[in-house]
Structures are given as C-alpha cells and as structure tokens.
Image (tube, rainbow, N blue to C red):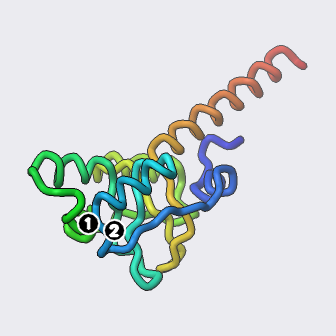
Amino acid sequence: MNISGTVSTILNQKGRQVYSILPDATVFEAIQLMAEKNVGALLVVSEHRLLGVISERDYTRKVALKGKSSRETKVLEIISSPIVSATPGHSVEECMRLMTNNRVRHLPILEGEKLVGIVSIGDLVNWTISAQDAAIEQLKSYITGL
C-alpha cells in the first residue's frame, strides 16, 4: 500500500455508493435517510447535477440552533455551498488539506461533472493509518531479513 495514494484507491476499496437527496425534500427526510444509511452527510442532487452537501452539522447549526422546524425546512435552504470537491486522481494528502482548509468532513468526488463517489475525513484517516501500518511491516521485514 502506497502512503501517497489517490482517492481512486480509496473508492475502489470502500465502494462508490453515494446517498443523495433532492433539494426540495425536507431536512427531516434528510436526517431520516442519514440515520437509515448510517452516514453523516448526503449529496444534494437535482437532474444528475450536484448542488451541494447536507450534513448533520448543517442540521444542528442551521435548523436546530435557529429554532426552525426540520419538517418544514427544505434541504436547499441549508445546504453547504460552494461545493468543495475532488477528483479520483487527487492524492489523500491533497484531500485532507482541502477538507481542513475548507472545514468540511465530506468530499464529493467528481469526474468532470459526473459524481463518482464521496469520501469522509474518516475514510482518509483510516486509509492513512492502514498505509502507515503496511509501510511499517515492510520496513520490519526488510530490517529483519524475513
């Protein structure tokens, strides 16, 4: 496993499953879907076009703390924008930097305008830990001659 891997490698391992919601759905429906799928964010898509991301953080900060109703507020009203995204060719390090600089936890992966996956900060951290573990094992084998 190469420590300087790309997002494509992560998507090939974890899969390219993307959960999305329409912009006119209610925030309540979005939260229900996130709970059902055990994810922290959904991509907001209309007519095969990515409009933004809605996350649990968006819900807590833009609905719950503002006293709005999740059953009446539309997803489009609270989505995160502008969209911060990457391509399958971006390195894990580049994606971590993008996410840190833009203070986002989920990164849609696009090829042109086509949505091909999503990675979370957890995906990147887990991949980095696995890559480091593999590198350590290779070094141990080299040093011990096994």
Q: Secondary structure at mark 2?
A: strand
Question: Which residue is nearer to you in this view: 74 or 61?
Answer: 74
Q: Residues within 10 Å of mark 1 (few under 14, many from 20)?
A: few
Q: Residue at x 24, y 68 (%)?
A: 74
**Relative to 143, residue 107 above or below:** below
Question: Which residue is nearer to you in this view: 108 or 86?
Answer: 108
Q: Residue at x 45, y 66 (%)?
A: 20
Q: For mark 2, what is the residue?
A: 52
Kindly give the residue lying farthest to the right in the view shown. Answer: 146
Kindly give the residue lying farthest to the bottom in the view shown. Answer: 47
Q: For mark 1, what is the residue?
A: 81
Q: Residue at x 35, y 61 (%)?
A: 29
Question: Which amino acid type is marked by label 1?
Answer: Ser
Q: Are marks 1 and 2 in contact (CB under 8 Å)?
A: yes
Kindly give the residue lying farthest to the top in the view shown. Answer: 144
Q: Quadrant of residue 41?
A: bottom left
